[in-house]
């Protein structure tokens, strides 16, 4: 990937990138503030009723994630961000965009449908904390969705220019592994869609009440991302859409494969450690296999995407 090429965007779009990056960092700072308060409250003994040490550790992890997210947002705004090595920046951005950007339609649909859709009573969380968390997630998601593509267009223009048949998109070096990841992603996407629309295969009967309206919306979001990842990477690697602009498949493939990895890498330790009263609606073996397959598929699809766009020597 070239670091300095002819930019595809002008100064006006660079200004948009900076505003979006600063907005994302500012929004996520509100989320970080709430999480830090929760950690302190837990250390002072006020968090014991919701999980004790496990609850504190979970929030310490989210504090670290928020700090990394703020650093990513600032890297997208500052000239220093152009000098950060590509590999760690792309990896962090892959996880961050995969975790947050697919949540934009989820948050819009959830708001349009009027709240959580759960029936477990009123939340004990103060209203301002809920507002700060919502602003943090939404602001970071929207900011990343705007700033990151512009950053990539500025820093790595050759990855996005041209079409798939221009001779600069190389086939995968491990087609069997990639085909397997595509199939796994597609199967998981269908499974999550089935659950979103009321399917019960693989769900624990005693815990099906956990699949409320918001859970169904999340499953639909994850299903969409899984199918998008499988489809876009397959088209890129196999060149089945030769006249399609490279950017039109590259960015969805990047975000969707990141969603496969990020969300399931988050759910897997929760399913193993079960902090507080956490339970999965799936049977435990189903959940563990599901999350592990999704993590592996996401990593393989990212590797295939990077290899497909690697420039010939």
Image: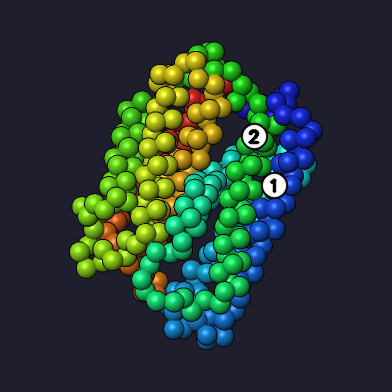
Tally of numbered discs = 2
- Asked whether the viewer can see residue 293, the reply is no
Q: Which residue is mark 1?
A: 20
Looking at this view, is 86 or 166 the one in front?
166
Image location of residue 81, percent across then percent down: 72, 43
Looking at this view, is 162 or 310 the one in front?
162
- Asked whether the viewer can see residue 248, the reply is yes
Neighbours of disc 1 within 10 Å: few (<14), some (14-19), many (20+): many
In the rendered view, tell whether residue 222 sits above or below residue 177.
below
Looking at this view, is 117 or 9 the one in front?
117
Neighbours of disc 2 within 10 Å: few (<14), some (14-19), many (20+): many
Image location of residue 87, percent across then percent down: 59, 39
Position of 239 with respect to 208 (left or right) is: right
| Quadrant of the snapshot with the C terminus | top right
Q: Residue at x 46, y 63 (%)?
A: 115
Q: Residue at x 34, y 62 (%)?
A: 212
Location of residue 203 (image quadrant):
bottom left
Q: Residue at x 22, y 68 (%)?
A: 206
Looking at this view, is 113 or 56 the one in front?
113
Q: Earlier in the sequence, mark 2 or mark 1?
A: 1
Q: Which mark is residue 38?
A: none
Q: Which mark is residue 152?
A: 2
Alpha-carbon distance for marks 2 and 1? Answer: 14 Å
């Amino acid at each position: 990937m070239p670091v300095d090429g002819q930019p595809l965007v002008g100064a006006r779009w660079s200004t948009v990138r900076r505003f979006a990056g600063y907005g994302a960092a500012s929004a996520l700072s509100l989320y970080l503030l709430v999480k830090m308060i929760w950690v302190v409250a837990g250390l002072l003994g006020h968090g014991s009723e919701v999980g004790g040490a496990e609850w504190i550790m979970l929030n310490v992890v989210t504090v670290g994630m928020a700090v990394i997210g703020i650093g990513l947002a600032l890297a997208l705004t500052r000239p220093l961000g152009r000098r950060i090595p590509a590999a760690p920046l792309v990896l962090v951005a892959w996880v961050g965009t995969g975790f947050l950007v697919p949540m934009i339609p989820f948050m819009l649909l959830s708001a349009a449908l009027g709240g959580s859709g759960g029936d477990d009573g009123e939340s004990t969380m103060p209203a301002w904390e809920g507002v700060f968390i919502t602003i943090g997630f939404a602001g970071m998601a929207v900011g990343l969705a705007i700033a990151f593509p512009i950053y990539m267009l500025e820093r790595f223009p050759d990855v996005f220019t041209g079409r798939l048949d221009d001779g600069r998109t190389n086939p995968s070096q491990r087609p069997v592994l990639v085909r397997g990841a595509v199939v796994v992603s597609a199967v998981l996407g269908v499974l999550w869609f089935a659950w979103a629309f009321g399917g019960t295969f693989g769900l624990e009967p005693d815990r099906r009440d956990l699949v409320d309206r918001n859970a169904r919306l999340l499953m639909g979001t994850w299903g969409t991302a899984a199918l998008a990842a499988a489809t876009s990477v397959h088209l890129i690697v196999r060149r089945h859409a030769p006249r399609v602009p490279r950017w039109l498949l590259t960015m969805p493939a990047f975000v969707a494969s990141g969603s496969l990895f990020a969300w399931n890498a988050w759910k897997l330790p929760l399913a193993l450690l079960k902090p507080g009263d956490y339970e999965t609606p799936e049977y435990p073996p189903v959940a563990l296999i599901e999350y592990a397959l999704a993590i592996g598929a996401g990593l393989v699809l990212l590797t295939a995407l990077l290899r497909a766009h690697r420039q010939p020597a």
